Structures are given as structure tokens and as C-alpha cells.
Image (spheres, rainbow, N blue to C red):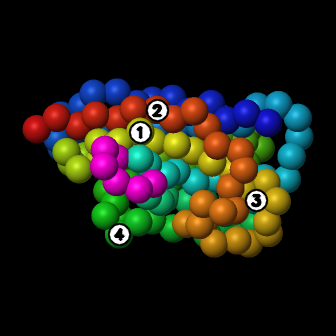
Amino acid sequence: VQLQACGGGLVQAGGSLRLSCAATGRAFNNHAMSWFRDAPGKEREFVAGLSWDDDRTAYAGSVKGRFTISGDKAKRTVYLQMNSLKVGDTAVYYCAANTHYHVAPLSNTDYYIPWGQGTLVTVSS
């Protein structure tokens, strides 16, 4: 199973971007897909998650109200619509899939295998 993330780029503060992440390969139990990010000098941070098991969504406080996660389980694809982007949103964004744990915490990296390759989002002032 591989995750392919795309949609990153350079955008001015206040702008929008839409990331997408598609899972390819053999069939697997897809319990949840989420987005995390690595900002310069910071630890990996949970951004948003979507549980296919119980339709939960979760967001980091820093993005709530600006970012929206959605997805298509049949297509094994998840999206992250990012609006009102800030310079502080600059990071490499990773998607990840929970393929083993039913109804697991969305923000905990321990539950996610595999991970995508990351897509860079740069927000300029």
C-alpha cells in the first residue's frame, strides 16, 4: 500500500490550497486517514483526521475553522481544503492511513501505517 499526496505549492497568506492523498496498491482495511505536518524546527503535528469507522473528524486547534478534511472511502482518497492560510502553516504535509486499528485516536501517530511522501506547502507574507 502506498499513499500519494499532492497539491502543495507556494501561496500568499490568506490564500487557499487543496491537498489530496490517494492510497494505491492491494486492498487493505482503511480505518482512518489523516494529515500531519512538519514545520521547520518543530515536531510533527497533527492537522486533521477522518475516521471511516465512525465518520469522526478531528482538527488541530490551530487550523479549526480554516481547514476542512473530506474523503471518499471507495476511492481511498482524502482531501484537505486549506483556506485563510497563514505563514505559520508553512510545512511539509504528510498523509497517513490507519490500516490496523478500529476506532483509534485520530491524532496519535502510533496508529498510522503507511505514510505518504509529503508535499510542501509554503505560505508567503
Q: Quadrant of the C terminus?
A: top left
Instruction: Name the dominant secondary structure of the magenta segment.
Output: loop
Q: Which picture quadrant has residue 59?
A: bottom left
- Distance, label 3 to label 4, CA atoms, is 23 Å
| Residue at the disc numbered 2 | 119
| Residue 74 x/y as whole percent | 77, 44
Q: Relative to residue 120, is residue 82 depicted above or below?
A: below
Q: Nearer the viewer, mark 1 or mark 3?
A: 1
Q: Quadrant of the N terminus?
A: top right
Q: Which picture quadrant has residue 104?
A: bottom right
Identify the amino acid type marked 2.
Thr
Is mark 2 in CB contact (under 8 Å) with mark 1? yes
Q: Which mark is residue 61?
A: 4
| Residue 19 x/y as whole percent | 47, 37
Which residues are drawn in magenta? 39-44
Q: Which mark is residue 31?
A: 3
Q: Residue at x 35, y 42 (%)?
A: 91
| Residue 103 x/y as whole percent | 74, 72
Sooner in the amino-acid sequence: mark 2 or mark 3: 3
